[in-house]
Image (spheres, rainbow, N blue to C red):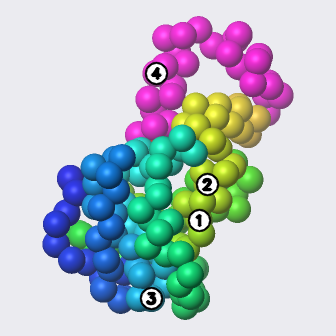
Amino acid sequence: MSDTIKTINCPACKEEMTKIFMSEGAANIDVCLNGCGGIFFDNRELKKFDENSESIDELKQAIEGKNFKKTDEAQTRICPLCNTPMVKNSVSTKGNIIIDECYNCGSKFFDHGELTKMREEFPTEQDRRQALLADTYNEVGLKIDQLEIQNTINHTQRSKFLKFLDRLFF
């Protein structure tokens, strides 16, 4: 699904979201400016803004100086695009940044502050993928550090595995 032009309500607090045009990514991001400060990304929009090198200046200006109300982050959110229950997923190897994802349309919702935390934890998508890859191997009992992973898995296998992870998590 591409960038929606219709006005949507926030999946966390139900307030009407405001579209912020992001010039660098040429996309309209839905931000809950009059409620909880959450950010909603249509399918594939997040890839344009998930790295520190990618500008989110318009977003920062829009939320600067605002006070946002708290929401129950444990509640199940409903996707405002397709009305499907969203799923809680971690975008952090430490498990401390949990976002809401719609498996039906691919949209993602970040509570206030979560996008910044994710960008700080992993400055680039490559860093995030490598951390996820290392954690995946560690979970199955292999104690392989980043360098060993790169030396152990040949390029073709690694590319296939990263594409698989990309479909699952990004």
First along the sequence among labels 1 and 3: 3
The answer for how far apart the CA atoms under marks 1 and 3 are is: 16 Å
Residue at 31% over, 77% down? 18
Q: Main secondary structure of the magenta part?
A: helix
CA neighbours of label 3 inside 10 A, class few (<14), some (14 to 19), many (20+): many
The relative height of residue 13 versus residue 155 in the rendered view (above or below) is below
Amino acid at dot 4: Lys
Residue that label 1 marks: 114
Residue 17 % position (x, y):
32, 79
Residue 59 in which image quadrant: bottom left
Amino acid at dot 3: Gly
Q: Secondary structure at mark 4?
A: helix
Q: Secondary structure at mark 3?
A: loop
First along the sequence among labels 1 and 4: 1
Q: Is residue 132 visible?
A: no
The magenta stretch spans which residues?
141-167
The answer for how far apart the CA atoms under marks 3 and 2 are is: 21 Å
Question: Could you tell me which quadrant the C terminus lies in?
Answer: top left
Amino acid at dot 1: Glu
Q: Are marks 2 and 1 in contact (CB under 8 Å)?
A: yes
Residue 30 in which image quadrant: bottom left
Who is closer to the viewer here, 28 or 128?
A: 28
First along the sequence among labels 4 and 3: 3
Residue at 54% over, 10% down? 155
Residue 54 % position (x, y):
48, 44
